[in-house]
Amino acid sequence: MAGRERVLRMSVELPLWRALAGYRVLTMLYALGLCVTTYDQFTRPWIAIGYDAVLAVWTLATLPRVRGAASCTKGFLAADLTIALAGVLLTAFADSHQRIAGGPTLPTIWTGGAVLAFAVKGGWRWAAVASTVVAAANLVERGQLARDTLHSLILVWVASIGIGYVVEVARVSERTLARALEIQAATRERERLARDIHDSVLQVLAMVKRRGTALGGEAAELGRLAGEQEVALRTLVAGGLLPVARIAEDTAVPVVEPTGPADHEGPDGTGPVDLRTLLAPFARDGVSLAEPGAPVPLPPAAARELAAAVGAALDNVRRHAGADARAWILVEDEPADILVTVRDDGPGIPEGRLAEAEGEGRLGVAQSIRGRLRDLGGSAELISVPGQGTEVELKVPKGALAARGKKAERR
């Protein structure tokens, strides 16, 4: 729903409503000025003065009504159109027949604002009805269909219908955009869920399968069942069929995605996290960590996601390079980026193996690494040469992290 609310806030209707409010005020002032400058030419000037006074009060009092579609009700539109029609018809009583034939009506072009309100509120069909009613009133007031009258009526009719059609198209586009944002949010949540599953459930199932097969007997049957469940779950993850639901943070492997704000965050639980403290547990036999001497502060969520990506890269080293492979983690705090490089001395990745693994539902690189960095506004580059090991470079621009933090504060 947050995506839909953003779309509504940036709706193209809002500038139209503001423009309509300004149009009503300006045309009301124009009608008043015209009345004052031609006061002595009216046969019954008191009618013109009285109507313009009502018009001014009505326009100013109803400005809140034209701030949006919700406040611009059908009742208001009907009353507004009635004011316009009354002014058109009263012109015959306030002015002479000679001036009526070629002069403006009492509300003048303010009448167009009443018709445009119908267009912005209800689209081109409402605009067609309102402009037709105004055209009929003008014909009754003038008593004949002159060329100038016809041109004015056609102009109002075409303009109002055109604006109404544009508003309808804009509304359809906004609904489509809102739906696209909702789908995007759902897709991101599915990807996050897929990463959590890959980092926890799928790894456990794969381990049970390997251990069960090695032990044999009843354990082998258990391993076979675990393998079947792993394949089925990978199929669901790869096909995007998993429901959008939030998994508790403690379902992830603890060393990959640390939980709890107390250990590394500020005293209020919202301060920056030193990335080094989250990567330190990875340094053990066979894994070396090189880090800056100064803290590398990151927003808590971003630090955990980056650490989880490093954990996923190390897990790939353990699974594919073997238990004897060595790995190195290098953390670099550059002026514009945070760089974390994970390198190993394993056999490397054969060409085309990543695409093949992704097709099989093995999303360790696609989701647990690249997906996390993409959500952070960064990138993950994987360089592998057969026989010379693999290097994974994780880059997160500090500007993207700052924008992410401001967005979270607004929420």
Image (cartoon, rainbow, N blue to C red):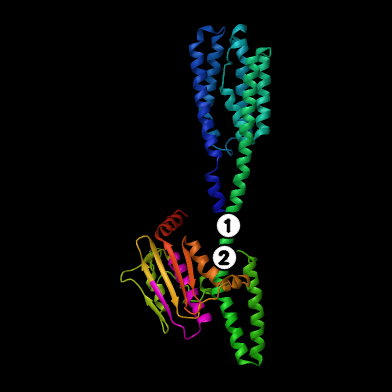
Q: Is residue 224 above or below residue 349?
A: below
Which quarter of the picture shows residue 191?
Answer: bottom right
> In the image, is residue 108 above or below residue 229?
above
- Outermost residue to the left: 293
Residue 172, x across and y down, in percent: 63, 44
Is residue 60 left or right of 332 when viewed as pictured?
right
Q: Type of residue at label 2?
A: Glu
Main SS class of the magenta portion in the image: helix
> Residue tagged by mark 1?
184
Name the spot of residue 31 as percent of width and height, x first: 52, 19
* Residue 49 can be seen, yes or no: yes
How far across and how far down the image is residue 2, in percent? 54, 53
Reading the image, the residue beneath label 2 is: 191
**As displayed, is residue 367 above or below residue 36?**
below
Give the magenta-colored segment's residue range. 301-330
Instruction: Decide whether residue 187 is among the magenta residues.
Output: no
Tell me the element at label 1.
helix
Q: CA distance from mark 1 to mark 2?
A: 10 Å
| Three-letter amino acid code at the position of disc 1 | Gln
- N-terminal of the pair, mark 1 or mark 2, is 1
